[in-house]
Amino acid sequence: MSESVDDVVREVSLARPAGVLTANAEARGGLGKKQPHKLGLRSALTALVLATVTLTALLIHLFWSYTARLNVADVVGQLNRQIVSSIQHELHGVLDDASAMQEAVRSIFFQGTIKTADEGKREFVFLALLRSQPSLSWISLGFPDGGFFGSRKASDSEIDMIEVKWDPATHTARQRTDYYTPEVGDIIFNNREFEPSTYDATAQSWYRRAIEEKEPGWTRVSNFPGSNRQAIGTSTPLVVNNQFVAVINVVIDLARLSQFLSSLQVGKSGTVVVLDRDGNIVASPDASAIDQQQDGKIPNLRTLGQNNKLLRVVGDYLGRRNADLTAFSETRQAEFTTAVDGGTYFVTLAPLQFDDWVVATIIPASDFLATIDRNARLLLVALGILTLLIAAVAILFANRLIGGPLLRIAGQLKHIESFELDNIAQLSSPLRELDNLSAALTQMSRGLASFQRYIPTALVRTLVARGVEARPGGHQQVLTVLFTDVVGFTGISERLGDRIVPVLSEYLEIASAAIANHHGTIDKFIGDAVMAFWGAPTPDERHAIDACAAALDCQRQLRRQCAGHQDEALPLRIRVGINTGRMLVGNIGSTERLSYTVIGDAVNVASRLEAVNKRYGTEILIGEDTRRAAGNAILVRRLDTVAVYGRSQGLAVYELLGMGHHVSAESLEWVVSYEAGLDAYARRHWAAAIGFFNAAIAARGSDYPSEIFIERCRKYLESEPPEDWTALSILGEK
């Protein structure tokens, strides 16, 4: 049977080139029919190129604006230099004020004008100094015992005096806060409050820096008694009479720098922002940035950019240009098209020469180019309308002539790839090349439709989807293989004659559906026999269970189908052999002819198990590896230990009775008696074995394997077997 199938496949393969030639002949008008004139692909592409050239020519008009844009860039550069200069002037002025104030405080204590312990004079001096410098936020002292004293400008209408004293006996601290209201020529005391405190001056970054470096220096600070505003401070050790007394710290709120930036005019709608080396916002005119700085938070581009488009533009520029803020040593200016809104902006980054700060200005290009763009629009209105018409016509023709047909042809190619040949239909196109291609695909699908009857289509789809190349090769894998055969098929064929063909087709349809429904791969049909396997090419961890379920399903469907036939040759019965083991799976054959199949000893055993059914009157037998792999998912009885044809070693054989969830345990009590008989038989207890087998027959009604073993036991009761006898049935035929 396999040779005849091979001959058919070979004939189809040999006939295939002729079909292809016929398709080509039809595509070229080889059938003698005059083909209508079609627009050539080259003509269509030429038309599209001409349309593209026309559109490209419009770009020439844009060159007149090049000089204007260069001038705009110069204006933007001058504006940015002015802004950076203003910020540097303001920043260095504030820094100089803080440094001067720090030196003044140090001189007052160093010269002995007042003592650091003189609270009254110290408080008066701090109030006066802070009031005289509007740009400063704090003047404070940190003492070695953790104590703190400072004057804070809470607002333009309030100055606070704060002192934290630590009790060395209890290791606790108390904070005193005095509230003052400054007036012209005077300052009014309002209130005093006391509260516990945990503020330790020696633990602060500004204190530690001054102690470690022993000289003035700047620090980013935020933690102060009663305040957590983001700020910068200059601190220095205070040494009086060669003895360290305290650390002087003069602080500037970053919010004040942000407020200064809000007073700058950056183009018509631009903004300016100061960033540190980590990309955090040091100063920004954005109101939410000022609020966050006053709340002790460090604003960043990501959070502020959610509500501020210009800040999002800065973040987009830094991210896309991979800008390293610490590496900026000179001003950089760029005209940048952002992904935020698709707009174009002038972005300038310039170092401030303080703590690696960088000032960034963002100005929409429309602030400067609006007039240029307006004039350009007036000139381009007429040409723009023509451009749109040309573009519309080009797109329409490109889609109708090329795009649409190619997409449909590509879709049909996918149908051919997945062997969905019923979905192939010839398409009509104004282009003769595409029309010929569609005709060739249609002819190809007809040839494949005939050819697919000789190959397992589902297997080919799976191999294509998994990228398995059609070349000889394979690999070892643990799989489950199944063989089926129709009982008495030769006699049925003789009785039915030609009527056997629909009966056989119906049986093979049932077997194929059962195997496919349980994820199996049909290997081949060998006359009335079916070979299938599980676990390849699609992985299946339940391959043994699925093979057993498919066998039972095929058996059940065949009985149901045959129950409706009145023919004397029916119903059909099948024998099934199933085995699990390591086998070679892959493309087996030559470079000219391949078959995706499995080979190996485990496959041969499955074939032998199918034949063993005939000896015991059973229908489905499985090997011990299948029994072990399927586990409790199936119900079986241990039938015998046999040495199948071609093997000398014994193999435990099991009869598959059903799936675990389909058969009740009560209906299989006879299995217990039968297997007890097997055990007694193996121990040479012949009489006891006969009793167990008779019990199995009585419980089941009839059981041919039990009758076989009863006959063996009676034989051995009459004549004992030799001493080296084992309970192994050796089968001398396939």
Image (cartoon, rainbow, N blue to C red):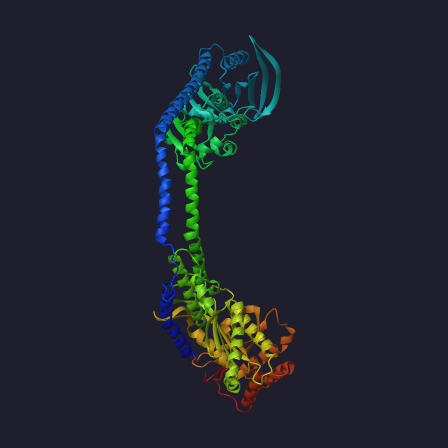
- Count how many numbered circles sit on residues in the image: 0
Residue 124, by quadrant, is: top right
Q: Is residue 471 visible?
A: no
Up-down: is 418 above or below 340? below
Q: Which x, y percent locates residue 338? A: 43, 35
Q: Position of residue 523 (x, y in %)?
A: 45, 72
Residue 720 to residue 601: above or below: below
Judging depth in this view, the residue of 155 and 27 nearest the camera is: 27
Foreground residue among 553 and 401: 401
Which residue appears farthest toward the top when viewing the image?
185
Closer-to-camera residue (111/438):
438
User: Residue 211, percent across and down?
Assistant: 43, 24
In the displayed structure, 274 sits above or below 101; it is below
In screen coordinates, is 215 left or right of 116?
A: left
Which quadrant is home to the N terminus?
Answer: bottom left
- For this rendering, which residue is in front, 383 or 160? 383
The answer to whether 241 appears left or right of 565 in the picture is left
Quadrant that contains the C terminus? bottom left
Indicate the quadrant where residue 419 lies: bottom left
State the residue at coordinates (52%, 18%).
150
Image coordinates for residue 549, horizontal then vertical, percent: 55, 70
Is residue 255 visible from the viewing direction of this image?
A: yes
Where 75 sits versus 28, above or below? above
- Left or right? Give the position of 405 relative to 121: left
